[in-house]
C-alpha cells in the first residue's frame, strides 16, 4: 500500500494545476461547520434542551406574586344570626349584613415547592435530551464533512481533467494548423486534413464540457460549505497531497463509533427515565406557602386613610396526594415501556446496518484500491508505448496517425487513472464515515 501511495504521488504530481496558495480541504470543512444551517439547527436544539433544564430548575425556586383588588359592594351579603343568640328560646332569627361598601386588598403570596416528583424526573430527562441532541449534532457534522470532502475531491478531479483536455486541445490544434499548411503544400490529402480537424473539434468540445463541469463542481463545493461566492476559486491541495492524507491502510474496525448509535442509547435511557417518573408520580407533592395581606374597609372608598387598613397573614404546609387519575399514569407507563422496546430494536437494527455499511465500504475501498493499482500499471505502460512511438516517429518507422492513436490511448488511460484515483479517495472517506472516524 505504501508503495502504491508513493507511486500515486509521483504519477499525479505533473498533473497538478495549482500551487499551495488557495482553499485547503481543512479550510473548506471549517467554513462548512461555521456556515451550514442544518448544523446551526442542531446546535440550537442543544441550546433549547439546556434552557429546558433552567426552566425545570426554576420550578424549585420560590414563586412570589402580588395581587391588588379594589372592590365596591353594590349589595352586601346577608347573614343569619340564630334567635337564641339573643337570649330567649324560640326567638326569631335575625338577618343582618356585615361589611363595608368598599373592600380593597393588597396581597403578597409565596409558594415554595419542597418536593415535586415531576421536577426530579423532568430534570434528568432534560439532561439526557441535551446529550441526545449533542450526538445528533455530531452526526450532522460527520455528514457535512463527508459532503464537503466529496465535493472538494470532485473539484480536484475536474481540475486534473481540464488540465489533460487543455493539453490535448493545444496538441490537436497544433496538428490541425500544421495539416492546413501541409494540405496547401500537397503533402497530405484533404481527407487527412479533415481527420485532424475532427480530432481538434472533438478535443475542443471535450475541453469545454470539462471546463463547465469544473465550474459546476466549484459551485457545488461552495454550496456544501454554505456560501454563495464561488468565483476565482483556487484549491491549495492536489490529488497527490490528498493521497498522502487519506491513502492509509484500511482495516475493519472492531467497534463502531457512530454518534447515531450513541444517540439511540441515550433515547433508550430517556424512555427508562420516563417509566421511573411515572412511578414517582404516585408520591405526594409537598409545598410551603405563605400570605401577607392588607385590607381596606370603608364606606367612602378612601383607600388613602391609614385607619381603614387592616393586615392579616398566614403560612402553611400543603401535601397534594394523588389517589386516582383514571389509570392515566399506568397507561402512560405502558406507553413508555413499548417505546423502550421499540428503541432497543431500533438500536440493534442500526448497529447491524452500520456494521454492514462498514463492511461494504471496506470492500468498496479495497476494490477501488485494486482498480487504482491496475490503472497505475496501465498508465505506466501507456507512457512507455507513447515514448516508444515518439522515438519511432522521429526515426520515420511509423506515421503521424500511428502516434495520434497512441496519444489517444494515453489520454484515455490518464482519464481512467484519474477516475480510479478519485473513486479510491471517495471510498476511503466513505469508509471513515461508516466507522465513525471522519
Image (spheres, helix red, strand yellow):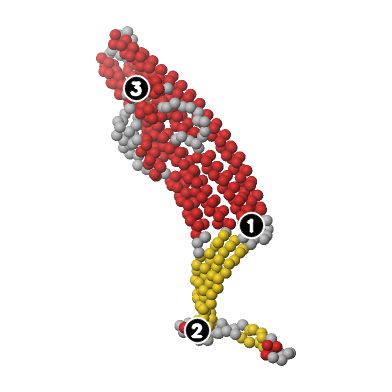
Q: Is residue 17 above or below residue 92?
A: above
Image location of residue 415, percent across then percent down? 39, 23
The answer, for residue 400, to whether it is visible in the render is no
Count residues near mark 1 (Cα–Cα under 10 Å), then give few for <14, some for 14-19, many for 20+. some
The reply, left or right, for residue 427 in relation to residue 155 is right
* Tag in front: 3 or 2: 2
Count residues near mark 2 (Cα–Cα under 10 Å), then give few for <14, some for 14-19, many for 20+. some
- Write down the quadrant of residue 225 in the picture: top left
Count residues near mark 3 (Cα–Cα under 10 Å), then give few for <14, some for 14-19, many for 20+. few
Image location of residue 104, percent across then percent down? 52, 79
> Which residue lies at the image location 57% right of the left edge and 59% below the top edge?
116
Q: Is residue 308 above or below residue 419?
A: below
The dot on residue 10 is 3
> Which residue lies at the image location 48% right of the left edge and 24% below the top edge?
367
Residue at which label 1 appears: 282
Residue at which label 2 appears: 308
Nearer the N terminus, badge 3 or badge 2? 3
Q: Secondary structure at mark 3?
A: helix
How far apart are the alpha carbons under marks 3 and 2?
Answer: 100 Å
Residue lying furthest right in this view? 90
- Write down the quadrant of residue 345 in the picture: top right
Q: Secondary structure at mark 1?
A: loop
Q: Is residue 165 above or below residue 33?
A: above
Image location of residue 436, percent across then percent down? 48, 35
Amino acid at each position: 500500500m505504501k508503495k502504491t501511495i508513493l507511486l500515486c504521488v509521483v504519477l499525479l504530481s505533473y498533473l497538478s494545476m495549482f500551487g499551495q496558495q488557495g482553499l485547503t480541504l481543512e479550510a473548506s470543512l471549517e467554513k462548512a461547520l461555521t456556515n451550514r444551517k442544518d448544523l446551526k439547527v442542531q446546535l440550537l436544539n442543544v441550546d433549547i434542551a439546556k434552557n429546558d433544564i433552567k426552566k425545570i430548575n426554576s420550578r424549585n425556586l420560590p414563586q412570589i406574586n402580588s395581587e391588588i383588588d379594589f372592590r365596591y359592594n353594590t349589595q352586601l351579603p346577608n347573614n343569619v344570626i340564630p334567635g337564641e343568640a339573643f337570649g330567649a328560646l324560640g326567638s326569631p332569627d335575625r338577618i343582618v349584613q356585615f361589611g363595608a361598601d368598599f373592600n380593597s386588598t393588597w396581597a403578597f403570596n409565596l409558594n415554595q415547592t419542597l418536593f415535586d416528583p415531576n421536577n426530579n424526573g423532568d430534570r434528568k430527562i432534560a439532561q439526557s435530551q441535551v446529550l441526545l441532541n449533542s450526538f445528533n449534532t455530531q452526526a450532522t457534522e460527520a455528514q457535512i464533512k463527508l459532503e464537503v470532502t466529496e465535493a472538494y475531491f470532485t473539484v480536484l478531479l475536474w481540475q486534473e481533467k481540464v488540465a489533460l483536455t487543455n493539453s490535448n486541445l493545444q496538441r490537436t490544434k497544433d496538428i490541425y494548423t500544421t495539416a492546413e499548411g501541409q494540405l496547401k503544400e500537397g503533402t497530405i490529402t484533404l481527407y487527412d486534413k479533415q481527420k485532424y480537424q475532427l480530432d481538434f473539434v472533438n478535443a475542443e468540445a471535450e475541453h469545454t464540457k470539462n471546463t463547465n463541469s469544473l465550474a459546476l463542481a466549484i459551485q457545488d463545493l461552495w454550496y456544501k460549505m454554505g456560501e454563495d461566492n464561488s468565483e476565482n476559486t483556487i484549491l491549495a491541495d492536489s490529488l497527490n497531497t490528498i493521497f498522502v492524507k487519506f491513502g492509509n491502510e484500511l482495516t475493519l474496525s472492531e467497534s463502531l463509533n457512530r454518534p447515531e448509535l450513541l444517540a439511540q442509547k441515550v433515547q433508550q435511557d430517556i424512555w427508562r427515565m420516563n417509566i421511573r417518573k411515572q412511578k414517582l408520580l404516585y408520591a405526594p407533592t409537598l409545598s410551603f406557602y405563605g400570605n401577607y395581606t392588607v385590607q381596606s374597609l370603608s364606606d367612602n372608598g378612601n383607600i388613602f386613610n391609614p385607619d381603614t387598613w387592616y393586615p392579616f397573614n398566614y403560612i402553611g404546609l400543603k401535601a397534594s396526594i394523588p389517589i386516582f387519575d383514571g389509570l392515566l399514569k399506568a397507561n402512560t407507563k405502558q406507553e413508555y415501556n413499548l417505546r423502550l422496546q421499540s428503541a432497543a430494536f431500533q438500536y440493534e437494527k442500526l448497529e447491524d446496518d452500520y456494521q454492514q455499511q462498514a463492511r461494504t465500504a471496506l470492500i468498496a475501498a479495497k476494490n477501488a484500491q485494486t482498480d487504482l493499482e491496475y490503472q497505475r500499471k496501465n498508465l505506466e505502460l501507456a507512457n512507455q508505448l507513447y515514448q516508444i512511438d515518439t522515438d519511432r516517429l522521429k526515426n520515420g518507422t511509423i506515421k503521424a496517425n500511428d502516434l495520434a492513436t497512441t496519444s489517444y490511448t494515453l489520454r484515455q488511460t490518464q482519464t481512467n487513472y484519474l477516475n480510479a484515483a478519485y473513486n479510491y479517495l471517495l471510498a476511503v472517506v466513505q469508509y471513515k464515515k461508516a466507522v465513525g472516524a471522519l
